[in-house]
Image (cartoon, helix red, strand yellow):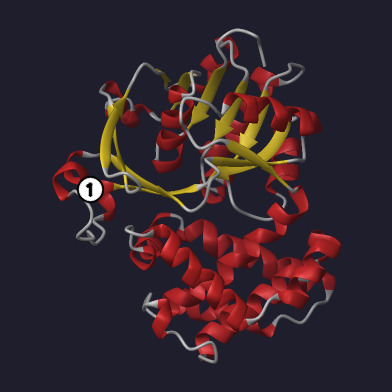
């Protein structure tokens, strides 16, 4: 990235896109959104952000807005963050966008960070866009974020309900990292973490590409939790049949050859009690945001197609490898019937 003010493009103005722009703006970066035309009106005024951490409302603006992907080639960007989910990215409009990104950035030093969740998203994007290996990495926010009006989540007594009602988005970090980028492109990771820091924002961190890749398997117990109607995790018995189904599906996914030794090791360590305890800890870390209600909104609707596509992709890969995945098949069947 340049020695001058870093310039970051963000594709998408949903929860992750806006929250990432909020952090980058506070860190001193220049932000340019690329959004569909109907999102321009939303971004025509300052965005109001409510923090569940200190119960304050903050507004930010000063970003630019593009609606035509062809304009990317005219922008002086240091990197681009694509916040579209995997289902949207692989749809017809998403593929056209990927081609346009490739046309604009091929042969340049501009890096692209992908926030989509799925299997081999990065390799697919590289093949579709024609960008180099060094230009593309996976990354995502370290916070739980939701649109306030759309999600309509329960409000904890500790929350300033009046301020929350004025917010466009509300967020809560589950740990110290504001954003995590994997190490599949070390140069891009180093440059981006240098930008995503300072001025009091939670710094970005670099994670292992192999661990990030296999981490997607955690979607299986999340979706199995949905089969239990998102009941409080303290009330979930690790021997519950639906929960066991989700955990068994996780292990089957982790054993896919694409995840290599890291996946095999993870499968050996994955247990119903262990995953349940991890989710219970996340429930505590998310407070005062209701973790169950957030997941019901997010995975129960907002990115549901991405989640189902991921499970179907995992099943097809298992079939191609001749692997027996009875739990995954049953989980998919139940989710499609729900």
Residue 299 in view here: no
Q: x and y percent of residue 96 in the render?
A: 58, 32
Q: Between residues 52 and 102, which one lies in front from this camera angle?
A: 52
Residue at point 28%, 28% (across, down): 59
Q: Residue furthest left?
A: 162
Q: x and y percent of residue 301 in the render?
A: 38, 60
Residue 311 to residue 150: above or below: below
Q: x and y percent of residue 275 in the render?
A: 59, 75
Q: Where does label 1 land, which residue?
A: 149
Q: Which image quadrant: the C terminus?
A: bottom left
Residue 131 to residue 94: above or below: above
Residue at point 76%, 38% (across, down): 127
Position of residue 92 in the picture relative to residue 146 (left or right) = right
Q: x and y percent of residue 73 in the render?
A: 60, 13
Q: Which image quadrant: the N terminus?
A: top right
Residue at point 40%, 55% (across, down): 302
Residue at point 58%, 46% (across, down): 116
* Helix, strand or loop status at disc 1: helix
Residue 289 to residue 162: above or below: below
Q: Quadrant of residue 61?
A: top left
Q: Between residues 288 and 232, which one lies in front from this camera angle?
A: 288
Q: Between residues 183 and 120, which one lies in front from this camera angle?
A: 183
């Amino acid at each position: 990235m340049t020695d001058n003010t870093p310039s970051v493009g963000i594709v998408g103005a949903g929860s992750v896109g806006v929250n990432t722009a909020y952090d980058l703006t506070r860190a001193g970066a220049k932000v340019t959104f690329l959004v569909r035309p109907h999102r321009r009106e939303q971004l025509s005024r300052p965005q109001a952000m409510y923090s569940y951490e200190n119960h304050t409302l903050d507004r930010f603006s000063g970003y630019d807005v593009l609606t035509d992907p062809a304009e990317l080639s005219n922008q002086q960007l240091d990197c681009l963050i694509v916040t579209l989910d995997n289902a949207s990215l692989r749809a017809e409009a998403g593929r056209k966008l990927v081609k346009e990104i490739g046309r604009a950035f091929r042969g340049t030093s501009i890096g692209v960070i992908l926030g989509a969740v799925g299997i081999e998203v990065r390799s697919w994007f590289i093949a579709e866009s024609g960008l180099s290996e060094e230009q593309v990495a996976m990354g995502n926010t370290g916070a739980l974020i939701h649109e306030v009006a759309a999600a309509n989540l329960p409000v904890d007594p500790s929350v300033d309900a009046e301020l929350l009602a004025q917010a466009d988005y509300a967020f809560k970090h589950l740990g110290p990292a504001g954003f995590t980028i994997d190490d599949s492109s070390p140069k891009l990771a180093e440059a981006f973490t240098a930008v995503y820091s300072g001025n009091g924002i939670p710094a970005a961190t670099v994670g292992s590409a192999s661990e990030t890749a296999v981490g997607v398997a955690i979607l299986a117990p999340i979706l199995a939790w949905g089969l239990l109607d998102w009941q409080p995790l303290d009330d979930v018995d690790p021997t519950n049949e639906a929960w066991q189904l989700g955990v068994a599906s996780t292990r089957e996914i982790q054993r896919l050859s694409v995840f290599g030794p890291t996946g095999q090791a993870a499968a050996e360590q994955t247990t119903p009690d262990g995953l349940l305890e991890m989710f219970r800890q996340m429930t505590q870390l998310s407070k005062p945001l209701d973790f169950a209600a957030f997941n019901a909104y997010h995975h129960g609707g907002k990115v549901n197609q991405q989640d189902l596509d991921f499970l179907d992709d995992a099943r097809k890969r298992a079939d191609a490898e001749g692997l027996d995945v009875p739990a995954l098949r049953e989980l998919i069947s139940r989710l499609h019937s729900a």
